[in-house]
């Protein structure tokens, strides 16, 4: 078995902003404390939900450093370091290690999409440049590039490539990946609507958007499954489908930030090009939050 970055529920945490769009570190610290108090097993900083794509290099590294300092060893911190520039991804990975990150999250290259052979070269170059455990991130709906099972079989041969955050919505492909990689690749769900299905294939947890607003419930879902109550976990999965749908009725992280603001967490706006959600989306989101007594 490879090194395990975490087991259970990891929050793909939002990055709070002031009204002038500067990062609100005080609020970020409050969120990290609340997440840990509610049972979250890992903080994933500077991911897609954290708006890393609109951060400066200085902000990106400072957010990682801040999260590590605030978590203070209570839970591990995974740092988003993915890029479509291999050299930049290597630089950021080294900066994340210097800032104290416990593991790294690396999305596939996007826009200048590479081949499956190129994926192996890209991720091996990164893995050769660090000794931190690397979690791959496969989200073809955003990147236009899908890691094939046979490619996973090559990638997992590297000792530092330990896991994947799988969000390709293809359970059949996941089954093939599991059959090819076995214990050499840890699987995390990258979709809140597929936590239990992926756990049932041997998955070790979820990197969750939902956990931003329902950290306790997301942790409990994974723990219920690990405790052997598969039926109970399946019922919990079914129950959250409405709120999960509402969190993705607009471009992530627009709805989840809006939800946190409605809950009084005051995480501020998203940076451009993301804008406020539509009235219809807001109505859907508000309705689901009320069902869960979150507002």
Image (cartoon, rainbow, N blue to C red):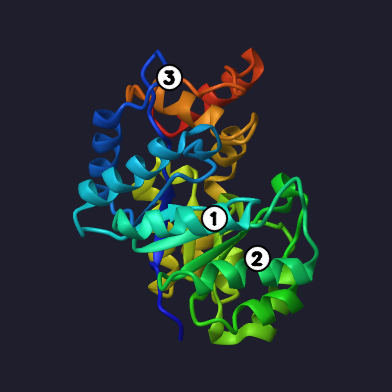
* Residue 268 vertical placement versus 148 (above, below): above
What residue is shown with label 3? 21
Q: Is residue 284 visible?
A: yes
Q: Residues within 10 Å of mark 2 (few under 14, many from 20)?
A: many
What residue is shown with label 1? 89
Q: Tell me where residue 279 sits by quadrant.
A: top right
Q: Residues within 10 Å of mark 1 (few under 14, many from 20)?
A: many
Q: Position of residue 143 (x, y in %)?
A: 72, 48
> Residue, x 45% and y 39% (percent of image)?
57
* Residue 123 vertical placement versus 295 (above, below): below
What residue is shown with label 2? 122
Label whose residue precedes the other's in the sequence (3 or 2): 3
Looking at this view, is 274 or 295 the one in front? 274
Q: Secondary structure at mark 2?
A: helix
Front of the two marks 3 and 2: 2
Q: Is residue 213 visible?
A: no
Front of the two marks 3 and 1: 1
């Amino acid at each position: 078995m490879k090194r395990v970055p975490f087991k259970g529920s990891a929050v793909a945490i939002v990055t709070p902003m002031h009204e002038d769009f500067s990062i609100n570190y005080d609020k970020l610290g409050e969120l990290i404390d609340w997440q840990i108090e509610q049972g979250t097993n890992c903080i994933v900083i500077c991911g897609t939900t954290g708006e890393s794509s609109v951060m400066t290099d200085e902000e990106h590294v400072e957010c990682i450093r801040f999260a590590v300092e605030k978590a203070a060893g209570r839970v591990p911190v995974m740092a988003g370091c993915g890029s479509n520039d291999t050299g930049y991804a290597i630089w950021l990975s080294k900066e994340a290690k210097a800032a104290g990150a416990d593991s790294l999250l690396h999305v596939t290259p996007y826009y200048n999409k590479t081949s499956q052979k190129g994926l192996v070269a890209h991720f091996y170059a990164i893995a050769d440049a660090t000794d931190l455990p690397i979690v791959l991130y496969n989200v073809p709906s955003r990147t236009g590039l899908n890691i094939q099972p046979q490619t996973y079989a090559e990638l997992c041969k590297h000792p530092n490539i330990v896991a994947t955050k799988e969000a390709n919505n293809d359970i059949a492909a996941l089954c093939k990946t599991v059959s090819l990689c076995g214990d050499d690749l840890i699987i995390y769900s990258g979709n809140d609507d597929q936590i239990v299905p992926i756990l049932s294939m041997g998955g070790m947890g979820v990197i969750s958007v939902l956990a931003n607003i329902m950290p306790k419930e997301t942790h409990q879902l994974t723990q219920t499954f690990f405790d052997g109550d598969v039926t109970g976990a399946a019922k919990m999965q079914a129950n959250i489908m409405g709120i999960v749908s509402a969190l993705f009725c607009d471009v992530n992280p627009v709805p989840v930030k809006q939800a946190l603001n409605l809950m009084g967490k005051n995480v501020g706006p998203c940076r451009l090009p993301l804008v406020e959600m539509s009235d219809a989306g807001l109505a859907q989101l508000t309705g689901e939050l009320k069902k869960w007594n979150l507002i």
